[in-house]
Image (cartoon, helix red, strand yellow):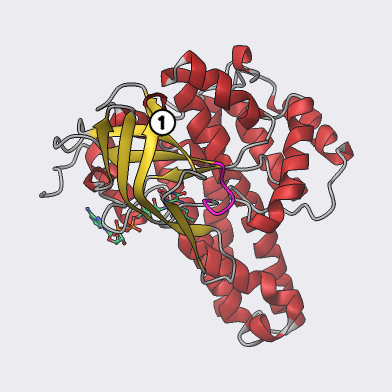
Amino acid sequence: MEYDVEPQEDGAAIREEIRSFLSSAPRPDGLRNYGPTPTDDDIPAGRTWHRYLADHGYACLHWPARHGGQDASVLRQAIFAEECARAGVPRQLVMTAIDLVGPILIHFGSDLQQRRYLEPIRLGEDVWTQLFSEPGAGSDLAGVRTRAERTPTGWLVNGQKLWSSAANSARYGLLLARTGTDTHRGLSMFVVPMATPGVTVRPVMQIDGESKFNEVFLDDIQLDHDALIGEAGQGWQLAMFTLGRERLTLGSQAVAMFKLHARMAQAARDRDLLDPVLARSLTRLWARMWLLRATWQRAVAHGDMASPAFSVLKLMTSETDRDLSDLATEVLGTDACANSDDNEFVHSMLVARAQTILGGTSEIQRNVLAERVLGLPKEPR
Ligand SMILES: Cc1cc2nc3c(=O)[nH]c(=O)nc-3n(C[C@H](O)[C@H](O)[C@H](O)COP(=O)(O)OP(=O)(O)OC[C@H]3O[C@@H](n4cnc5c(N)ncnc54)[C@H](O)[C@@H]3O)c2cc1C
């Protein structure tokens, strides 16, 4: 069987080492597990925390050693993400910088770009935002309409981006823009200093009351020649290069799910609500969570981020998470809103909506699985 692969490393020893490091690491005031993206208020504590991780060899684990990383295996990266979730701390200042920008610059950036941007990312100094999605280009990312035109001094950019996480706090943006007419080969990738005249950032209020997303308007912004990453027309290849890295953090979602399930069962017991119908729903979810956990362990042991198991996991984890938090709020009813101790359930129910959208919606994941893994006919386009 393809996935019956024993890990080459001792997972228990790695876990022990990381758990012990995290339990003795000093927590800066105000640090919370904000996930992949900090709010503006999270940044001071997130930055101090990231610096501590970097100073102790726990930042940018997947980067090559020559750029200050650890060349860490998928198993080690996954255990680190999971143990951070268990300890209630973020694993970085902002995920876009270490998981998206870093690997792209390491593989495609010029020497100048690598020298200028990589070390501040590794040390948690600069916040980056991903400027890919637009009002008319999300699932169909190749529909990007923001244009970059060559000028004698570099590039002139016009367009609008949407859902740009942390753009309001970011020093730089990683921009996907159209430089030609061909759907895929007409796209290029740029670094945008967010302080460039003509860049306007408008935060978007989310359903959970936080504001991590933004609209970004790019009006006649001028970029130097060296803002281009790789070659003109290589943008699609670069955009696809790190796609799916967020799947590594799926195991950490499972940690949160098990905690939520235990709290929900206790809340139902305390209110004397555990009838056979609810007990069955709780047991079904619990079984799904264990199946996910086993699939996750197999995928991680296999050590290949391109494995179809990760695509199945993205779909199943986000939908299980959604069903779990929906059930939690149903069980608690109005208590979930009225009782501040139970606000966690409401928050998790609202945030779960995003999980089935980010990094490829559930519908798109099903298409990908059908076409690329099962070899079924392609959807009509
Ligand atoms: C938490 C979060 C963080 C994000 N951060 C960023 C960021 O930092 N930078 C960035 O650029 N973007 C970011 N995004 C945007 C994200 O990539 C898009 O929301 C996602 O790709 C979906 O695109 P869309 O919102 O335009 O929806 P659409 O693509 O318009 O889809 C709308 C609906 O139609 C369905 N649909 C679309 N096409 C098909 C199809 N072919 N077959 C079947 N159904 C289909 C979708 O599944 C969905 O239900 C973030 C999103 C979230 C939720």
Instruction: Name the main secondary structure of what is drawn in magenta.
Output: loop
Q: Judge whether 277 appears above or below 137 on screen.
A: below
Residues drawn in magenta: 167-171
- 196, 95: nearer the viewer: 196
Q: Judge whether 31 appears above or below 59 on screen.
A: below
Q: Where is residue 155 drawn, in percent x and y?
A: 32, 34
Whether 253 is among the magenta residues is: no
What residue is disc 1 on?
307
Residue displayed at 48% across by 36% down? 245
Q: Where is residue 1 drawn, in percent x and y?
A: 41, 25
Asked if residue 62 can be seen in this view, the reply is no
Q: Judge whether 221 appears above or below 278 on screen.
A: above
Q: Is mark 1 within 8 Å of ligand 1?
A: no
Residue displayed at 47% across by 24% down? 105
Name the quadrant containing residue 212. bottom right
- 257, 117: nearer the viewer: 117
Ligand 1 quadrant assignment:
bottom left
Q: Amino acid at mark 1?
A: Ser
Name the quadrant containing residue 153. top left
Q: Is residue 308 left or right of residue 41?
A: left
Q: Where is residue 318 drawn, in percent x and y?
A: 48, 55
